[in-house]
Structures are given as structure tokens and as C-alpha cells.
Image (cartoon, rainbow, N blue to C red):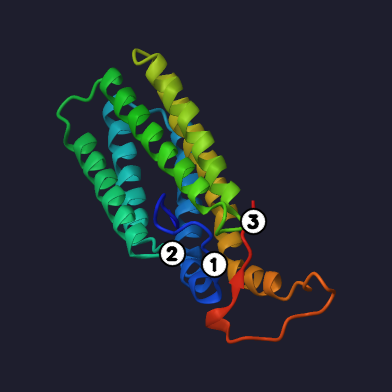
Amino acid sequence: MFVAPGSAPFGYKLTHKAAEQISRNWGLVLLNGALLVVAGFLIFSIDWTVRELATFIGVVFIAQGVVEALTTGIDARVRRTNVVAGLLSIATGILIIVWPEPGLVALAIVLAAWLVVTGTLAITGAFAARNVLPNWWLLLILGLLEIPLGVLALANPGATLAALVTVAGVWAVAIGVMRIVLAFEIRRLPEAVDAAFREPAGNGTTPEPVPAHARPVAARS
């Protein structure tokens, strides 16, 4: 979402300017998380037919794709990756909505494949960001939540509608809550960079201030 494998060279240090660029996404991520939580509760509270659930999940895919495409990262490569991932999510949502007679098996397979793919992207992005973003572990948790849910749906593609509702609802609520937490973390990212810069040097002295755009933060694990 913010850093992709190979998008930052080894030893890259996060500058104040880059942190500010990432932090501008916080409102979008917060809105996305809130909408996912609402969607999850709606999935649990409505007595769905297969057609209705397919349409609703398709709308969620489209909304997720729009958010992904609009999310800016640490460089242009991440931006392009987000746009491609967003367009794929939108295309998947449209496919589910226009599908004439979506069956439970087809819907389960599409949902599961999407969760595994997005979870894998989140995990790889998290490890790519571990030396750049102090809150990289939140992206890791997102991926670790999505992949098991996807595998669960793939393991029993002939599941009942109730089982599919459970998987979709748990995913929406869990990922929504994590995105809300992530939103506030990235909002504070520039301050975290400045705080890291103000940490005393090894000799007990505090380094002289430098311009904000040049402030680096040491790699964190």
C-alpha cells in the first residue's frame, strides 16, 4: 500500500517529506476502515440471497479498488502498483455484480482468491516497509488476517450461504478495524520521524537541527 518490494533501495531512510506524503492518506484509510466495519455488520445483520450478497460484495470490491487506486506511497512505483491493484479490484467487483447467476461455489472462489492475493500483497509490502515505516507490522497483521480467511473459503468452496456470510463479515469487520488503527498511525508518522531524529546521539548529545525535508529516521525493525 505504501511501500512495495524493490521500491526503496537497501538502507533507505524515511525523510520528513516522504512521511508527510504517506500521512496524507490517513483520512482515506480511515474512511475505508469505517465503511468496511459498517459493511461487515450489514453482512451479519441481513438475511441475504446469493444474488444480493454477490451484489453487495461486488460493491465492496469496487469501493476497495477506488481507495487502493487513490492511495499514494513512498514513490512512483508504489503509486503504479496501487493503481493496478485498485483497477483489478474494481474489475472483480463489476464481474461479480454483472454475473447472471452467481453460485455459492463461484462466489466463494472469487472472494477467497481476492483475499489471498490482497493478503499476500499486504505481507510483502509490510516486509518491504520494515526498514522504512515504524508501523509496518500493521500491514503485516492485515495480510495475516486476510490469507487465512481466503484459505478457509477455498478449502470448502461448496460451503453454505451462512458460511460465506461469516467469512465475508469477519473479513470486513477485522480488516476495517485494522485500517482504522493504521489510519491514526500514519497520521502521526511525520511526528514519529521528527521524534526519532531528536533522539540523543550515542555520545549523549543532541544533533543540530536540519531542514525538515532532509530529516531521516533510522531503520527500525
For the point 41% across and 23% down, the residue is: 164
In the rendered image of this protein, does residue 141 appear above or below residue 84? above
Amino acid bearing label 2: Ile
User: Is the residue under label 3 in contact with that under label 2 (CB below 8 Å)?
Assistant: no
Q: Earlier in the sequence, mark 2 or mark 3?
A: 2
Q: CA distance from mark 2 to mark 1?
A: 9 Å
Q: Is residue 100 left or right of residue 181?
A: left
In the rendered image of this protein, does residue 123 appear above or below residue 26? above
Return the residue at label 1.
Answer: 14
Q: Dot 3, how many residues are within 10 Å of its Cα: few (below 14), some (14-19), or many (20+)?
A: few
Viewer can see residue 194? yes
Relative image position of residue 98 (x, y in whole percent):
16, 36
Q: Dot 1, how many residues are within 10 Å of its Cα: few (below 14), some (14-19), or many (20+)?
A: many
Q: Is residue 126 left or right of residue 201?
A: left
Return the residue at label 3.
Answer: 220
Q: CA distance from mark 2 to mark 3?
A: 16 Å
Amino acid bearing label 3: Arg
Q: Which mark is residue 137?
A: none
Viewer can see residue 38? no
For the point 45% across and 59% down, the residue is: 9
Q: Earlier in the sequence, mark 2 or mark 1?
A: 1
